[in-house]
Image (cartoon, grey):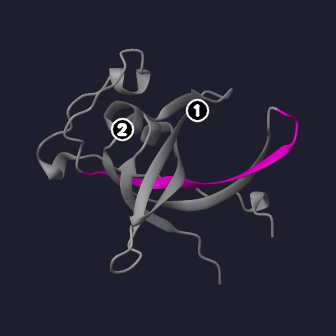
Amino acid sequence: MNYNRAILCGRVTKAPEILMTPSGHKVAKISLATNEYQGKGKEEKTVFHNLIAWDRTADIAQQYIVVGHEIMIEGRIDNRTYKKKDGTKGYISEVVIDRLQLGNKPRAVAVPAENTATSNYQEPPADDDNVPVIEDMDEIDISSIPF
């Protein structure tokens, strides 16, 4: 039996980076910080996660998510390789978002004017029932699984 799911709840550490693939799909790269309790008298440990949102979920990320925004995601863990600037091979683990829920927004946000990820920011609805939840369950291509 195999199962690949991740559920994370934390705060966004950088404005989503929005990219377009050559085939016209929108991609949002999001950095999320979660805190782990280490025990009485110890500091919390912060863990940073790389998130990827595609198409409509990327649109929601671009429109609503700002630095400090609390989000909850559900997705699958994906590992990939890439070529670094120095020509060596790099490895990265990312969580590909299937479901996204917006949580508490930051109290005050100082954002540079040139930040396109937040320049289209609109206040999310105050009513929690109207907050968008994305369920993007695309079929997984089995040939891309390395085992």
For residue 57, above or below residue 36: above
For badge 2, the amino acid type reads Val
Measuring from the top left, give residue 94's x and y in whole percent.
60, 53
Position above or below: 119 against 44: above
Front-most of 61 and 109?
109
Q: Which mark is residue 67?
A: 2
Instruction: Pick whichever, 85 or 64, lies toward us.
Output: 85
Outermost residue to the right:
87
Check the picture and name the quadrant holding the N terminus. bottom right
Residue 45 seen? yes
Image quadrant containing the C terminus: bottom right
Spatial CA distance of label 2 from label 1 is: 24 Å
Q: Determine which of the numbered discs, if any, sits on residue 83 in the image.
A: none
x then y, percent, for residue 100: 38, 52
Q: Residue furthest bottom?
A: 1
Number of marks drawn: 2
Magenta span includes 57:
no
Circles 2 and 1: CB atoms closer than 8 Å: no
Q: Nearer the viewer, residue 108 or 100?
A: 108
Q: Is residue 89 left or right of residue 135?
A: right
What residue is shown with label 1? 25
Measuring from the top left, give residue 144's x and y in whole percent.
76, 57
Percent coordinates x, y for residue 29 in the rendering: 53, 40
Q: Does dot 2 land on a helix, a strand or a loop? A: loop
At label 1, which amino acid type do we have? His
- Classify residue 126 as left or right of residue 20: left
The residue under the point 53% across, 68% down is: 5
From the viewer's perspective, is residue 32 above or below residue 6?
above
What range is drawn magenta here?
86-103
Q: Please, what secondary structure does the residue beneath circle 1 have?
A: loop
Q: Is residue 21 left or right of residue 6?
A: right
